[in-house]
Amino acid sequence: MAKIILSIFIILPMTGLSLATDTLGVNSSIGYGETLVSSNLTFELGFFTPRNSSMSYLGIWYKFSPNMVVWVANRNNPLADHDGVLTFNDAGNLVVLNQLNGVVWSSELSRVLRNPFAQLLDTGNFVLWDNFVSSPDEAYLWQSFDYPSDTLLAGMKLTLNLKTGFERRLIAWKSMDDPSPGDYVHELDYSQGLPQYEVVQVHVHRKKSRTGQWNGVQFVGWFNTPSPIIVSVFVYTETEISFMFEVQDRQLVSILRLNYLGVVQLLVVNRSRSATWNALIEFPSDPCDFYGRCGANAICNDSLCECVKGFMPNSLDEWTVLNFSSGCKRTIPLNCSKGDGFWEIENVKLPDQLEVTLYRSMSLDECKDKCLKNCSCTAYAISDIRGRGIGCLMWFGHLIDMRVLEEGNHVQTLYVRQSASKLGIHAYAN
Ligand SMILES: *[C@@H]1O[C@H](CO)[C@@H](O)[C@H](O)[C@H]1NC(C)=O
Ligand SMILES: *[C@@H]1O[C@H](CO)[C@@H](O)[C@H](O)[C@H]1NC(C)=O
Ligand SMILES: *[C@@H]1O[C@H](CO)[C@@H](O)[C@H](O)[C@H]1NC(C)=O
Ligand SMILES: *[C@@H]1O[C@H](CO)[C@@H](O)[C@H](O)[C@H]1NC(C)=O
Ligand SMILES: *[C@@H]1O[C@H](CO)[C@@H](O)[C@H](O)[C@H]1NC(C)=O
Ligand SMILES: *[C@@H]1O[C@H](CO)[C@@H](O)[C@H](O)[C@H]1NC(C)=O
Ligand SMILES: *[C@@H]1O[C@H](CO)[C@@H](O)[C@H](O)[C@H]1NC(C)=O
Ligand SMILES: *[C@@H]1O[C@H](CO)[C@@H](O)[C@H](O)[C@H]1NC(C)=O
């Protein structure tokens, strides 16, 4: 009994210390056990120690669900104990200092701030401005949204600035109890062709999963179950590519997280009921979502693989024991001079853009023509399905990571090059 009373006496003053404010000014600091709380009490910022860990980190979590840490500052540089403070240094930078006043994390601004303020907003964004020269309504000098951890909050954009090259990407935790940067990164792939999102296992440079390309309406195969509660917004302009989502129901809170196993999850909780988060969407969600499961020139359907028409397994032995990784080869080599044709595959997630060329304003007929005339073109598809469809995406080399998708939902058709003799239709090739 005495023990319980003692701990109450210890804990109460600690929570009492919580500044009950959302703002940190220049001569103030917060230490372990003290927190900033956003004005409508949704988010809390302070030091935390993961379960099964002795390290501590500065982070942001939901006040109603403290285990749901959505941002971590000193991921690369944990505090070995509970002795840390968040404060401003002489230049007005936000810093986390350890016991010896060593800097374990900093907002790393290049300019000096005269009267810096940091505020935890109701959106979950922790922002910094200089009260000497601007107000909080103007552009922030630094914001946590620019440096996501593993979590995308509702209303927070995952962006690539095409002018500056600045990108926000999600980097998974190392394990459930270790926020340091783990194996997986969720990022935009915009090296060739059209934007698509990927989860990459960085240390081995291997893709784990990939959404379909942006087809003018959506990323095929990702967020394509229409949901009454989640609205996703994609922006693709000359200056910016971004993705974000909003939650329609005010009782529901939702986040998009890249977990430590490399699975992207849309987690939802009913705030007025409990703090149990459920995964509404997961990616990969079935075996066909795993990148390149079927190897080259094959299509994944219901976890099994089929060679594209005109192709056969590279190794029948492996194929019959359901090891599909070696993929498929042509049954009859192409002979361009004889004239080729195309085989139509409907409702398919288009192959990865390993070697592609994009012509934004070509029609489907022009696209076919262009592909036909170039003997190394292996397939083509309409790149923007809006209206009657426009634009031409042409593939060279192997076709990797295709899957059958449900009809409807803005899925696409791929035209795969075939030798004329295989199609048996000379006229089709013109
Ligand atoms: C912060 O502390 C310094 C040194 O004590 C003092 O000169 C300065 O006026 C203080 N600033 C504010 C905004 O209180
Ligand atoms: C913490 O560690 C214990 C013992 O090693 C283990 O049984 C438990 O699952 C761990 N908890 C978490 C959340 O990882
Ligand atoms: C707090 O503010 C955010 C952002 O404006 C809003 O989305 C959320 O619904 C608010 N939460 C509560 C409990 O009012
Ligand atoms: C959330 O929980 C409340 C209370 O149990 C319930 O009335 C409400 O319908 C739930 N909202 C949703 C969207 O499930
Ligand atoms: C996919 O497999 C199912 C059976 O599992 C079959 O009914 C369907 O026709 C297949 N779809 C395609 C496009 O091959
Ligand atoms: C599948 O076949 C590849 C060779 O193509 C081999 O390296 C791999 O180990 C096989 N996988 C399994 C699970 O047997
Ligand atoms: C391709 O077809 C032409 C015309 O039929 C023939 O002369 C040539 O030998 C063929 N080339 C190959 C590699 O099969
Ligand atoms: C075929 O297309 C590729 C990629 O655009 C290009 O490098 C190559 O020169 C083209 N070949 C011909 C014969 O036009």
Image (tube, rainbow, N blue to C red):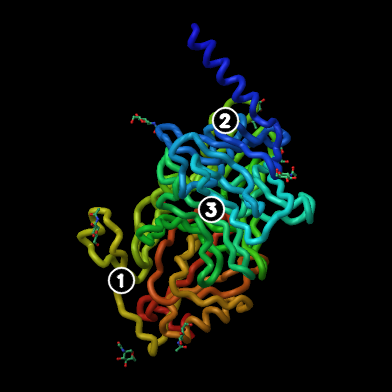
Residue identifier under label 2: 33
Closer to the camera in the image, 46 or 185: 46
Secondary structure under tag 2 reads loop
Between 400 and 110, which is closer to the camera in this rendering? 110
Give the residue type at disc 1. Answer: Lys
Which residue is at 63% across, 39% downward? 29
Front position among marks 2 and 3: 2
Name the element at disc 3. Answer: loop
What is the quadrant of residue 387 in the picture?
bottom right
Residue 122 appears at what percent x and percent y?
Answer: 70, 40
Disc nearer the start of the sequence (1/2): 2
- The earlier-in-sequence mark between 2 and 3 is 2
Alpha-carbon span between mark 2 and mark 3: 40 Å
Q: Which residue is mark 1?
A: 329
Q: Position of residue 123 (x, y in %)?
A: 68, 43
Q: Callout 1: 10 Å neighbours few (<14), some, many (20+)?
A: some
**Could you tell me the amino acid type at mark 2?**
Gly
Identify the disc placed on residue 222: 3
- As drawn, is 327 to the left or to the right of 166? left
